[in-house]
Amino acid sequence: MSQFHVDGAHILYNFIQATGSLNDVSGSRTVVVELERGNKVWIRTVTSGHHGSGTLHGNEFSTFSGWLVAVNE
């Protein structure tokens, strides 16, 4: 399971379940947030008995993208 945070505030979860599967699984989420200069945004993984191992694979297996939609003056 992973979590999306803005300045330490949890915004959403992303949870994938592949019970009994030996194959890799994937998932995606989209979130639109209004940010201000200096805001910090990050993804963190969570390990729990009910929600996976907390592993987020690197080496081109995971991506994180953001877009500037508009500038508020």
Image (cartoon, rainbow, N blue to C red):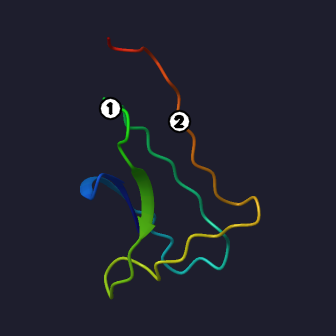
Q: Is residue 9 left or right of residue 30?
A: left
- In this view, the residue in front, 26 or 43, is 43
Residue placed under numbered mark 2 in the picture: 66
Q: Residue at x 76, y 66 (%)?
A: 59
Can you name the residue that lies furthest to the top here? 73
Q: Earlier in the sequence, mark 2 or mark 1?
A: 1
- In this view, the residue in front, 14 or 20, is 14
Where is residue 23 shown, x and y percent of the image?
Answer: 67, 73
Can you name the residue that lies furthest to the left here? 9
Which numbered mark, 2 or 1, is in the foreground of this view?
1
Name the quadrant containing residue 35. top left
Q: Residue at x 75, y 58 (%)?
A: 60
Where is residue 64 shown, x and y percent of the image?
Answer: 57, 48
Within-10-Å neighbours for mark 2: few <14, some 14–19, many 20+ = few
- Which quadrant is home to the N terminus? bottom left
Q: Tell me the amino acid under the disc marked 2.
A: Gly
Examine the rendered structure and indicate whether residue 3 appears above or below residue 23.
above
Where is residue 17 shown, x and y percent of the image?
Answer: 45, 68
Examine the rendered structure and indicate whether residue 3 appears above or below residue 51.
above
Q: Residue at x 37, y 41 (%)?
A: 38
Tell me if label 2 and label 1 are in contact, CB under 8 Å: no
Where is residue 73 shown, x and y percent of the image?
Answer: 32, 11
Name the quadrant containing residue 56. bottom right
Can you name the residue that lies furthest to the bottom here? 49
Q: Is residue 70 left or right of residue 48?
A: right
Residue placed under numbered mark 1 in the picture: 36
Examine the rendered structure and indicate whether residue 36 appears above or below residue 48.
above
- Numbered tag placed on residue 27 in the rendering: none
Within-10-Å neighbours for mark 1: few <14, some 14–19, many 20+ = few
Can you name the residue that lies furthest to the right here? 59
Q: Tell me the amino acid under the disc marked 1.
A: Glu
